[in-house]
Image: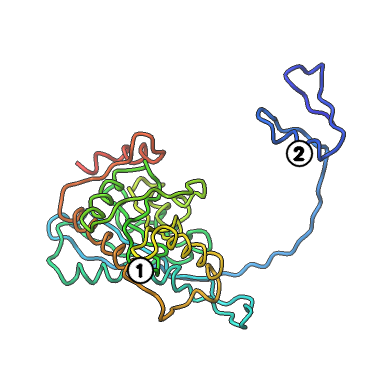
Amino acid sequence: MTRETSEPSQPVQYGDFEQVRREARRPGFRPIDLGATLSADTSVELRRIQSRNVIGRLTGSRYPNETISSAGHWDSFGIGPPDAEGRRIRPGAVDDALGLAGVIEVARAFARGPRPQRSLVFAAWTAEERGLLGAEYYSANPIYPHETMVANLTMDVLQTAGPARDVVLIGQGQSEMEDLLADAARAQGRTVSVEPHPERGLFYRADHFALAKRGVPVLLIMALAGGNDLVTGGREAGERWVADYTGRCYHQPCDAWSADWDLRGAAQDAALVYEIGRRLANSREWPAWRSGSEFRQVRESSAAARR
């Protein structure tokens, strides 16, 4: 097999497929025709499953058409193969019943207090585990215009290892939402730590992404992004919690409620979402995307709707 280079008269010769694979790892490699074909025959089963997003609203007292949304997802993986203990149900207690509980508690807190100036929207998305389908469907068919949605705050996995000295920022450099996060964390006596593994792309892998694509500034709280600096045990204990959860229980039957949980850290994060939401709901702030963000242009195209 051959690959034509910039000098067609001198094709590069390859002896076998393994040599091609090694060559493909080098900078500057260009695709070549391997001269290979594939014929396959498979059956397809089509099933239609109907599900629901659940959305609540507290109407703003002064600017009802401007919204701030808080959201989590209510689905998990349901019934699957049995684990070593014979359990087949995968409850999704941390991912994401705990995050959704945070959304509900934020809604309760707002409902008990004075009605905010802007409207608050609370969403429980379906089918997140099937590719962010519920949030994507809503974002393609919005009830409340994206142009006048001030921000979205998403809680997807809160940690159960106790209070933390910090909160982990996902998507550094994307928007001014990180400034609001820093202010709210400072008021709690906490700092902001940047996610240690941005190459995992968590900013693009949760429900908020469907809204970000439409220009809505977003903030994701996700304990899987990196171990917190825990009050008891420090960063090492935080990393140990992440490793234990992802290694044993993530999407597995053991992701179930436990009496051993210490939810003070989860409560801290839910309180951050509340404070950021309260600040935005009672101000004229419109957080913007940073100049280098790929979402900035779509947001700027609707600037007239926010004047």
Left or right of residue 265, residue 91 in this image:
right
In the figure, residue 107 lies in which quadrant?
bottom left
Left or right of residue 64, residue 105 in this image:
right
Above or below residue 297? Residue 194 is below
Secondary structure under tag 2 reads helix
Query: Residue beneath label 1, please?
Result: 162
CA separation in Å, label 2 and label 1: 47 Å
What residue type is disc 2 on?
A: Arg
In the figure, residue 275 lies in which quadrant?
bottom left
In the figure, residue 162 lies in which quadrant?
bottom left
Q: On the rendered image, what quadrant is the N terminus found in?
A: top right
Q: Residue 127, percent across and down?
A: 48, 65
Query: Residue beneath label 2, please?
Result: 21
Residue 203 numbered tag: none
Left or right of residue 197, residue 185 in this image:
left
Between marks 2 and 1 in the image, the one whose residue lies nearer the viewer: 1
Q: Residue 252, percent across and down?
A: 55, 72
Left or right of residue 97, residue 83 in this image:
right
Q: On the rendered image, what quadrant is the C terminus found in?
A: top left
Which residue corresponds to the image point at 16% horizontal and 72% vertical from the top-left? 112
Secondary structure under tag 1 reads loop
Above or below residue 94? Residue 291 is above
What residue type is disc 1 on?
A: Gly
Check contact, mark 2 vs mark 1: CB within 8 A.
no
**Which is nearer the eye, 158 or 187?**
187
Q: Residue 223, percent across and down?
A: 42, 60
Q: Residue 209, percent across and down?
A: 42, 52
Q: Residues within 10 Å of mark 2 (few under 14, many from 20)?
A: few
Q: Earlier in the sequence, mark 2 or mark 1?
A: 2
Q: Residue furthest right?
A: 15
**Which is nearer the eye, 196 or 97?**
196
